[in-house]
Each structure stands twice: as structure tokens, then as C-alpha cells.
Image (cartoon, grey):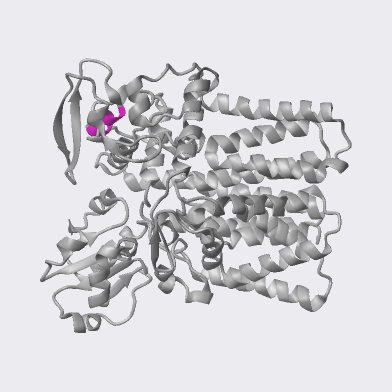
Amino acid sequence: MRRFSPKWLAGALLVIMAVLMIGASWQDSATVDETTHLAAGYSYWLGYRFRMAANHPALSQMLEASPLLAMDVKMPDVAEAILKGQLGYPYLVPWDGTPRSIQEMLPSGCQGQYVKLPPLGDVMVQWKCPENYPLDSWYYWAVPECQIFGKTLVYGGLNDGDAMLFGGRLVQVALTLLTGVVIFIWARSAANDDWVAVMALALWVFNPIALAYGHLTNTDISVTFGMALAVYLWGRFLEQPTRKAAALCGAAIGMALAMKFTAIILAPVFVVSLLVSWKRLNTTVISLAKMIGLLMLAGWAVIMIVYVPRWAPVRPPTGAEVAVLGIPGWFQAFRPLLIPPDFFKVIAMALSLSKSGYDAYLLGAWSHQGWWYYFPLALFLKSPVSYVILTIAGLVVFIRSARAPRPLEYMAWLGAGVYLLSAMTSHFNLGVRHLLPILPLLAVGTACALQRLKNKKVRMAVNILLGWQALVVVAAYPLYIQFFSEAVGGAPNGYHYLVDSNYDWGQDAKRLKKFLDEKGIQHIYLDYFGTQYSIEYLKIPNTRVSAEMAKQIRQGTLVVSVSELMRPEWAWLRDSRQPTARVAHTLFVYEMSLPASNASSWLSGELGAF
């Protein structure tokens, strides 16, 4: 009976993870970019070219949009016009991400008519051009258009937006669970012990970062699954280098790259591991080169399948396109060889964007170039104390006791280390979600290392820490995006350290609706960091305000997302008033009719559960 119990326990753990994520999936509102990814994937299934969300590979978006094929999805007129290139924005975004006026790219004779779109009055332009219509250009990056396309398709009023979003999220939940299966198989193969595999799986199941971003229609969990599978199969290849192992690993690499371009970090991981394992490979250079070639061919074949049938090289760019869109020289030079072209366009955009920065927040400060220590610190802040202790202990035990570790074990630590070092060089400090791919690796590495501990008291301490982690994470349900370590006071204090996708990503509109209904508040002034269309979809009466506009409010309820509130322009509100309530920790409520000195008396306590 004992030999079967670990597998049953593993199954129970996956069921628990599914329940936690499915519940959060239904309760969380649309976060930033979810509608964009979902709608882009749907447009690809309909046969439209890979124009929407062109800075991401197509596979992840198509997977999460697959449930929409079984729904009666109606295409609003505005969404269809955007999809066909009949409506555009008065500005464009070059491949390096710096917005410019679209007038610079328009051919002579073009005329445009401004159009306001309901329900929010978004301003777009209906162009009339004699030739070379810019929105039809393959090189055009339709980032503004695809954002409004996604919001209109999901929340434009013709479709059940909640059902569409939930369907896409279920696919992501499935990928998160499959990642858990990979972790279990990997750890069991590395340690030859089912109980070690259960521990590795538990470290994944009760990881708040995995629970937070594993249920969203984004590309993060997709590439996490792909990279975990690829690193595991690469470890198997290093232990037994065969053509079959090379082909399987190559296919996994191709899938990971088709999910998200960050999978390119696999390249330095594999190079370093080859150098480390060279003596034990027991094969010739020629034989190894052939198998690596087979690996690369298998990966390329998977990418080709994803982009079928669009394999033909793209036409040469015009001079105007090169000048305005910032198309890199290497892309122009190798253009005839870059097949499939849509995939290599993703690579070119990612490399161009990596040179620029992005406004990021850390410990009360803002920076456009970021901090080298952002990601290690974010990982610490967003993890339970017990998880941090177990991971550090696992690394120490591995370093001290692993004399000649198997590739299946050391690949977990090596992959996580190289990925983390690469992330620390990035100027895009967008959130801890970008570290998702290292979490399965840390789970395997930690569990395999800690199984070497033979002292009963020490092993009991490990089990207690794991139980502590499980209790802390279950108690945080369903607010996993805003989870913060107990070491810094948990979710209520998280905004002092990190915001944006780390904390407040627009996930609490439904909770705001519940709060307003229970308090009988009929109208709010709002600065919301999220999909405003979801606010309208929920029929929340609101007036959008900026920080400057809010200074003029003399009567009424003001609600500000904390990701906006922590910006410099809202300093006057932070300095003059205390919130009268907080919804789910992320939405700060102010009763502007009260004197600033008495603002906190309107409602005692924090409403973190709404």
C-alpha cells in the first residue's frame, strides 16, 4: 500500500491546486493585457495574420483562446474594423517601443476622420489612403489597436465576457497542473524516490506566485511549462545522449519558444551544462554535433507547425517603414532566411525592446532603468518565509553534499541560476511573474537536496516548514496576486514594496462592485489600474479622474488603484488623507466630503476580503 500512497497524495495535491486556482479565476476580474492575449489568439484561430500582440509568439495565445471556438462569440463592428485594419490610432509604436505620430508614415494624399468609440469615448482614426495603407503593413506593430480590439471583443456588450475570460483561464490552470506533473516526474527520476517527488510537487502547489499567475490568460505560465519540460528532457539527454532524447528535447524547446521569447534563455543554460557534463557524455564531438543538429531541427519544426502556412519570407521594408518603425539592420539583412517571419519578428521586437526601459516601482521609488537586485528581492518579498528557508537550505545542502550530482538534479539549480542572473541584467522590471520559469526548477532542486538530510529532527523541521507554507498560502485564498511575505506584514503592506502586476493589476473590479453595493454607494470617482471596460461591463457608475482632476472633488467617493496612487502625481492625496476603506488591499477608498483630518473615521478597519 505504501508504494502507491505517494502517487495518490500527488493527485490530491493537484486537485487542491486546481480548486484554489479555479476559485480565484472566477473571482478575479480581468487583469492588464488578458483581453489582448485572449482576443489575439482568437483572431489567429479565425485565420487572420499574426498582427495582434505581435511582440509575443502565437502558441500561448492560441491555446488560451481555444475554448472560444466552442462559444458563440460575436464580433462587434468596431472589433472587426480594427481587425481588418480599417480603424487605427493617431500614433504608432515602433519596434523599440517609443510611440510616434503615425503621420510620419502616411503616404501623401491620406485623409483621416476621428471616431469616438463607445462606451468610453476612445479616439481612433478612420483613414482613407490611396495606397500603401500603413495599418496593412506587415511591419506595423498594432499594439494600441490590439488592446482596444481585445477589450471590445470581450467586454463590448455582445459577448459574455466573464465566460470568455474564464474559459481562457481554465486552459492556463491546466498548463499549471501539467507543470506540476513535470515536476513530479522530474524529481522522482532525479532522486529515485516518490516521496521526494511529492515534496517537490508540494513546493509548487503551495507557491503563491504559481497560484497567482498560473490562472491568468497571459504568456507566463505557458513558457514556464515549456521551459520546465525542456530543461527536464535536456537533463535526460545529458544522462543518456541519444537521437530520441535529442528530438524530444528539441521539440520541447520549440514549444517553449513558441510560447514566449524568454525561453531563449535556455541557450546559455544548455551551453553551460554541456561544458559541465562534457567528460561524462561518453560520445564523440561529431556524434554530439549531429544530435544537437537534430535537436535544433526538431525545435524549428515545432515552430513551423505553429505558424503554418505562413512560411514565405516577408517582403523587403520600404524606406519609410525602416525609418519610422525602427526595423533593425540584422532583420533586414537576414530577412529571406527568417522563416517563419512572424516568429522572428517577435525576436526582433523583444531584442529592440530590451534596450529600452520601463517605469518600475520598488521600495517607494520609481525608475525607468530598474535595479539589478529587483528580481531577487521581489522573489523574497512575494514568497512565504518558510519557502525562502527551504529553498536556501536546499541550495546549501546541494552545494555542500553533492559531490557528483546527476544532470537531472544539477540542471534544476543551474537552469534557475542562469535564468535569474539573466533577469537581473534586464531593464524591464515588470514583476515577479517573470521569474515563474525558475519556480519548478527550484522545487525539484530543493526537494532532491533536502532528501539527503538523515537527521530525524531536521527532517521533521523540513516537514513543519512545508506545512507552514501550505497553511499560509491556503489562508491567503483567493487574493494570490497581492500575496506578500509574512516578513513584511503580508498583503496589507505589499504596496510599500511593489505594485503593478506584483500587487494591483486590475484584478479586483468584481470585489469593488460588491463593496459599493453593500455600502449603497451610487457613484464613484475612479482612477483604475486595469481594464476600464470591465468596470463598464460590471455597470459600476463612475467618472474617470486624473490626480489633478481629483483635487477639485468636493463631494463624493474617490477610488484609486494603489498602482496609480503610489505615483508622484498622487502624493498630495497620500500626504493629506487616509483611506476610509480598502477593497482587497488594492483599491483605496476616500470619502472626499469629510475633512482630511477626519477621513479615517468614516469606516473603521480594512475591507481586505471584498
For the point 20% across and 84% down, which residue is it? 598
> Does 375 sit left or right of 55 as displayed?
right
- Where residue 555 sits, quadrant-wise, is bottom left
Residue 233 visible here: no
For the point 47% across and 23% down, which residue is it? 332
Measuring from the top left, give residue 463's x and y in whole percent: 70, 72
In this picture, is 69 found above or below 235?
A: above
For the stretch drawn in magenta, the main secondary structure is helix
Measuring from the top left, give residue 76's x and y in whole percent: 25, 34
In this picture, is 321 found above or below 383?
A: above
Q: Quadrant of the C terminus?
A: bottom left
In this picture, is 506 found above or below 165?
A: below
For the point 53% across and 38% down, which residue is it? 259
Residue 589 visible here: yes
**Residue reaching furthest right?**
282
Measuring from the top left, give residue 512's x and y in whole percent: 29, 63
Q: Nearer the viewer, residue 2 or 171?
A: 171
Q: Quadrant of the N terminus?
A: bottom right
> Does 293 sit left or right of 349 as displayed?
right
> Does 168 sit left or right of 194 as displayed?
left
State the count of labels: 0
Measuring from the top left, give residue 388's x and y in whole percent: 62, 68
- Where residue 379 sits, quadrant-wise, is bottom right
For the point 28% across and 37% down, which residue is it? 100
* Residue 101 counted in the magenta span: no
Q: Nearer the viewer, residue 502 or 216?
A: 502
Region rendered in magenta = 78-83
- Where residue 462 sits, quadrant-wise, is bottom right
